[in-house]
Image: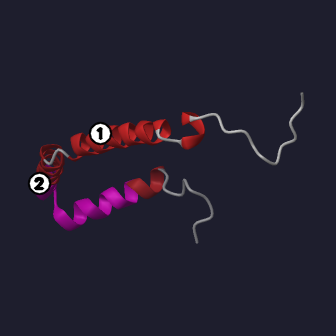
Amino acid sequence: MVQYAGWLGGPEIIVILVVVLLLFGGKKIPELARGLGKGIREFKNATEDSDIAKDIKDVASEMGDLKKDVEKMNPKKMIDIENPLKSKKK
C-alpha cells in the first residue's frame, strides 16, 4: 500500500532497470529508446500541426469581444434608472 507520493526511490529504480536489462538485453534497449523518442516526436508534431492552440486563442478573443458587446448593451448602463422602491431624499 502506498502511503505517500514519493514511494519510488533509488533502490526501486535500480531493480526496475535490472529487470528491463534482463528482459530485453543490452542490444535491444537503445532500439526501444529510439522508437519511443520517434513516437513522442511524431505525437508532438501532430499536435502542433493541428493548430488547436491557435483555434483556442481565436475563440477566446471572440468571447472577449462578445462580452464587451453585451456589457455595452446592458440597460442599466445605457440609461440611469432610479430604483422606484428607494425613498427620494431632497
Within 10 Å of the Cα at label 1, are there few (<14), some (14-19), or many (20+) other Cα atoms?
Answer: few
Q: Residue at x 54, y 53 (%)?
A: 6
Q: Residue at x 24, y 59 (%)?
A: 21
Within 10 Å of the Cα at label 2, are there few (<14), some (14-19), or many (20+) other Cα atoms?
Answer: few
Side of 31 relative to 19 (left or right): left
Side of 82 relative to 66 (left or right): right
| Three-letter residue code for mark 1 | Lys
For the residue pair 23 and 86, the one nearer the viewer reads as 86
Instruction: State the mark number for residue 35.
Output: 2
Q: Tell which residue pokes out farthest to the bottom in this image.
A: 1
| Three-letter residue code for mark 2 | Gly
- Examine the structure image and report whether residue 32 is included in the region drawn in magenta: yes
Instruction: State the mark number for residue 57.
Output: 1
For the residue pair 42 and 15, the one nearer the viewer reads as 42
Q: Residue at x 14, y 46 (%)?
A: 41
Side of 64 relative to 47 (left or right): right
Q: Tell which residue pokes out farthest to the front in this image.
A: 90
**Which residues fall within the magenta stretch?**
14-34
